[in-house]
Amino acid sequence: MGGQGVPWRRAGACYGEPGFAGSESINHQRGNSMKTLILLILFIAAFIIGGILLLGQAQSAQHESGMGYEDTPMLPGSKWHVHDAKRPQPVKVTAGTSSTQERAGLPPSDAEVLFDGQDISKWKNAEGGPAHWTVRDGYLEVAPQAGDISTREQFGDIQLHVEWRTPSPLKPGNVWQGNSGVFLFGVYELQVFESSRNLIYADGQAGAIYGQYPPLVNPSRDPGQWQVYDIIFNPARFEDGRLETPAYITVFQNGVVIQNHTAIMGETGHRILPRYTDRGPQGPVRLQDHGDLIRYRNIWVRPLKDRD
Ligand code: MG
């Protein structure tokens, strides 16, 4: 019975007992295993720490010239790497503010103001003399019979901001009204028209590239409300007098896209097909006198250039 109570003794392998003939050997083996385990742990730790140090060195080498990288692929058609550390930073510009019905907003800090509510010296009449439209209470109003007015300065690629309002109340009867226009390059008309209630053929309403493309949608405000055109315009490119690239125009009316990189067909006409003429790399901005008392305010332009 007693022997059965100590089963470990039956194993005959207890330390210090006569039957424990291989105990030192087993202990030695255990010691070796422990050493191997510790060495393995140390080896793994050294491997991980070494890896971290190497990665840190590689990263610091990539960042040594500042932000970005120089060991990345070259961007196609560009002199810059992906994330290029040496690529110039964009010029800082202070953004403008939005207009309200009561008050015109501020232009961006790098805009050239074409009409600030008072001064129309940057505009001329068709003969090159002073513009004789009416300036009153911060707006510029068409003076019927005075004719179109154009900027004295000429532009190529531009961002153009124009605010306009059609007269209120509407003229009685079913008559077209509220007609003026912003002519890009002096020859491509972005139509200004009373289009909240006043129907005309689709390519003649507000936001149309007159005679070519209606606007994508009609976000026109009521007569007497100020409306906004934000325009991006790229002139046509000619090679030896031959058209290489048409003029393109993108327009937001009251914040809504109405022309999306539209390829203009040619110079604006009435009841005729548009055609192109090579007029060189720059042209003016022209405002149309169509006999209606359209008002303009807060007109500014930003000439656009390619990135460095
Ligand atoms: Mg017009």
Image (cartoon, rainbow, N blue to C red):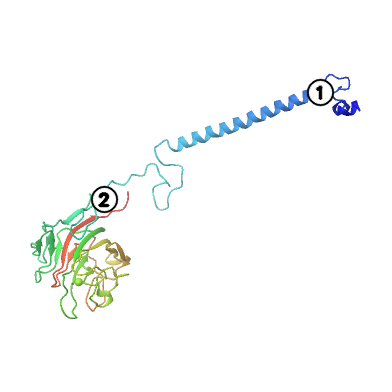
Query: Label for residue 95?
Result: 2
- Rate crowding at label 2 as few (under 14), some (14 to 19) or many (20 or more) other CA atoms within 10 Å: few
Of residues 239 and 183, the one drawn nearer to the viewer in this rendering: 183
Mark 1 is surrounded, within 10 Å at the Cα level, by few (under 14), some (14 to 19) or many (20 or more) other residues, namely few
Identify the disc placed on residue 25.
1
Determine the quadrant in which ligand 1 lies: bottom left
Farthest residue, direction bottom: 174
SS for dot 1: helix
The percent position of residue 195, horizontal first and vertical second, equals: 24, 72
Q: Quadrant of the N terminus?
A: top right
For image coordinates 70% across by 28% down, the residue present is 36
Relative height, residue 293 to residue 73 (above, below): below
Farthest residue toward the right? 1
The image shows residue 81, relative to residue 18, as above or below, that is: below
Mark pair 1, 2: CA separation? 83 Å
> Which x, y percent locates residue 213?
30, 72
Q: Is residue 163 above or below residue 204?
A: above
User: For the residue marked with disc 1, what is the amino acid?
Assistant: Ser
- The residue type indicated by label 2 comes to Ala
